[in-house]
Image (cartoon, grey):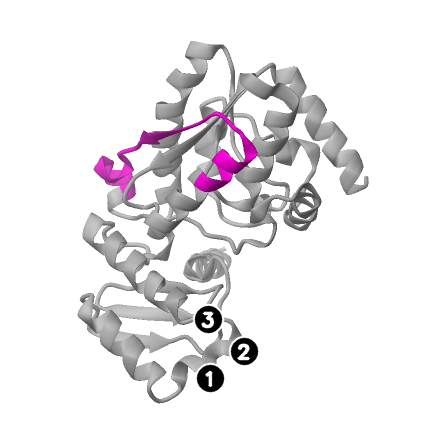
Amino acid sequence: MSALAKLARLRAIVADAGGGVVAYSGGADSAFLADVAYEVLRDRMLAVTAVSASLSRGEREAAGRIAEARGWAHMEVETHEIERDGYRLNPPDRCYHCKSELLEVLNPLARERGWPVMVGVNSDDAADFRPGQAAASERGALAPLREAGLGKQEIRELSRERGLATWDKPAAPCLASRIAYGVEVTTDRLERIGRAEAFLRSLGLREFRVRDHGDLARIEVPAGSVGRIAETGVRERVAEMLKGLGFRYVTLDLEGFRSGSMNEVLVGIERLRHEDDDREA
């Protein structure tokens, strides 16, 4: 099925819903969903941005600007996922607890209007470890992009054709996704990640991550930018800045930027578990 045929299917899915509260983070997927929902539903669509310590100031401001420019009804709500042990203690299913908090805040807004909540899950997301999808599904949220069969690249191309500023925006998951599993999520830790990434962005970097391993910061940049960050002068400035934020060690990952790299350890653990099961059998 072509991307245009999938877009037509998406419009039909959204229209059948009759209205929708769109969980809008400001990323490419949720922005595209909100834009199509607004096109179809008009004043029966509300884009809602969850505000907490895990959303950087820059992302929050950008989400507001896009919503205003597109003419959507948009509001912000506070979420308090950090008060949940299942989130704060940062187990592998942390996103389940985060998404549970989000849906428990959005569902009352949706019920008041008689609409469903819509989330920007696309058809490619099933390939990664995403426990948050289960929490959304359990709480009745719709995933129209996934239902229409739209993947990441199709969404970006269709967004470009619509003139959406997010069409080429790098993925920007919440700041908590930078923290290694088992390292406690705190507001101070989230803030220092946000400040560290803002500094790297000021150097002209566009796609990167600062991974927090407790005392150690692991910087991921595209492979072609590794040499630039390692240059004398730049390397010293980066190390000084991040140490000033409280990191004891600052490292540069030679494998380069890769989305979801924190989940690599989970794949290794699962492989070892299967090997142990095979030996016992």
Q: Residue at x 46, y 52 (%)?
A: 172
Circle 2: residue type? Gly
| Residue 121 visible in the shown view | no
For mark 1, give the secondary structure. Answer: helix
* Label 3 to label 2: alpha-carbon separation: 8 Å
Q: Residues within 10 Å of mark 1 (few under 14, many from 20)?
A: some
Report the disc number at residue 227.
1
- Mark 3–mark 2 CB contact (< 8 Å): no
The image position of residue 15, as x and y in percent, is 66, 19
Q: CA distance from mark 3 to mark 1?
A: 10 Å
Disc 3 + disc 1, Cβ < 8 Å: no
> In which image quadrant can residue 205 be found?
bottom left
Q: What quarter of the picture does the N terminus occupy?
A: top right
Look at the numbered discs 1 and 2 and tell me whether their residues touch, using CB distance below 8 Å: yes
Residue 266 in percent (x, y) is at 43, 57
In this view, 201 is above or below 155: below
The image's mark for residue 224 is 2
Is 19 left, or right, of 10 in this rendering?
left
The segment highlighted magenta reads 65-87
The residue singled out by tag 3 in the image is 221
Neighbor class of circle 2 (other Cα within 10 Å; few <14, some 14-19, many 20+) is few
Q: Earlier in the sequence, mark 3 or mark 1?
A: 3
Could you tell me if residue 96 is visible in this image? yes
Q: Tag 3: Cα neighbours inside 10 Å, few (<14), some, or many (≥20)?
A: many
Residue drawn where x is 56% and y is 48% of the image: 166
Q: Secondary structure at mark 3?
A: loop
The circle on residue 193 is: none
Looking at this view, is 265 or 207 the one in front? Answer: 207
Does 121 appear in magenta? no
Residue in front for this viewpoint, 172 or 87: 172
Across and down, in percent, residue 81 comes to 28, 36
Residue 93 to residue 255: above or below: above
